[in-house]
Image (spheres, rainbow, N blue to C red):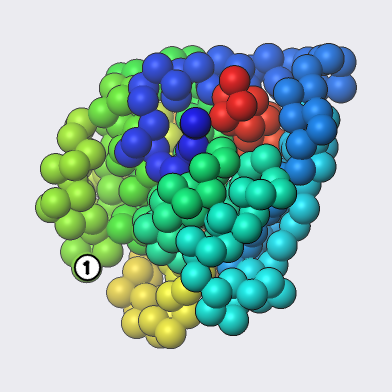
Amino acid sequence: MKHLLSIEKLPQADLEKILTAAAVMKRERGAHQLQPLAGQTWALIFSKSSTRTRVSFEVGVSELGGRPMFLSAADIQLGRGEPIKDTARVMARMLHGAVFRTFAQRDVEEFAQFSGIPTINALTDEEHPCQILADIFTVQEKRGNIAGKVIAFVGDGACNVPVSWMFAAAKLGFELRLAAPKQFQPDAALLRRAGGKIVCTEDLKAAAEGADVLYTDVWVSMGKEAESAERLKALAGYQINESLVKLAKPGALVMHCLPAYRGREIDADTFEANAQTIFDQAENRLHVQKAILTWTVS
Ligand code: CP
Ligand code: NVA
């Protein structure tokens, strides 16, 4: 049984297999005959908001011959406290796979364990593996092999997106620089688990110097709204803007997982100047997730 629960637990060979298959999915969209999910129904269980992940999985499951069933956690008994392990065992009797967006990573892992059907992490507080696979695919599509490149992340360096980037760094051999205030840097234990070449710094200019990619994410992740005031204050200045882009390698990619908050983690002009890359990145969620779905049932 194959699950995509985290980049941390995804073997390097499978990671590479998914990236290779994603290129075929993109190239042959609309023309390929692959229907690996024919006759299957997949649940999309979401405890948090989503635009990209929901749409790309609904479209992706359909294009692979399956039927997506969107379930807002608030509308099913899970939202009223039914245990994950009971939800998982019920769903396993009726469904063929599940895509789960929630808060705790352990909940997605428990779902996978008790359901025994392919389970995909569609974002937790700890990781966002589908996003990072699409991001790596985008870098490689535009700039070739990511090995040896420098990815500079600016902003909340301890949230799900940078953490998934961290676990990819050692597997694919790129350098990751995380520019964040001390309290928004990943802790030492997490850094040890990730291994690889990861530099944490409060100095965003040093992080951007000569980088191949400048990347950012929201300052206030879903579930952290109560900390908004404190985060906006601490993260002020950790922004991708024209002066930061000038420090990066000429032609550096500017990337954002979206949704973007202009004037916070990125300024409006820099966002628009890099919209082509950013929306290619969003589109690539579809192609990469079709590769992930196919991999789980192969
Ligand atoms: N980047 C991303 O996962 O977007 P959504 O929250 O809209 O799914
Ligand atoms: N770190 C963000 C990612 C959104 C796609 C969040 O968790 O809200």
Q: Quadrant of residue 7?
A: top left
Q: Can residue 255 be spotted in the picture?
A: no
Looking at this view, is 53 or 136 the one in front? 53
Looking at this view, is 266 or 135 the one in front? 135
Q: Position of residue 244 (x, y in %)?
A: 39, 48
SS of the residue at dot 1? helix
Left or right: 157 with respect to 44? Answer: left
Q: Is residue 229 above or below residue 43?
A: below
| Residue type, numbered disc 1 | Gln
Q: How many marks?
A: 1
- Residue in the picture at 67% in, 30% down: 290
Q: Position of residue 279 (x, y in %)?
A: 68, 41
Residue that badge 1 annotates: 183
- Residue in the picture at 12% in, 52% down: 188
- Residue in the picture at 23% in, 39% down: 194
Q: Can residue 133 be spotted in the picture?
A: yes
Q: Is residue 116 above or below residue 91?
A: above
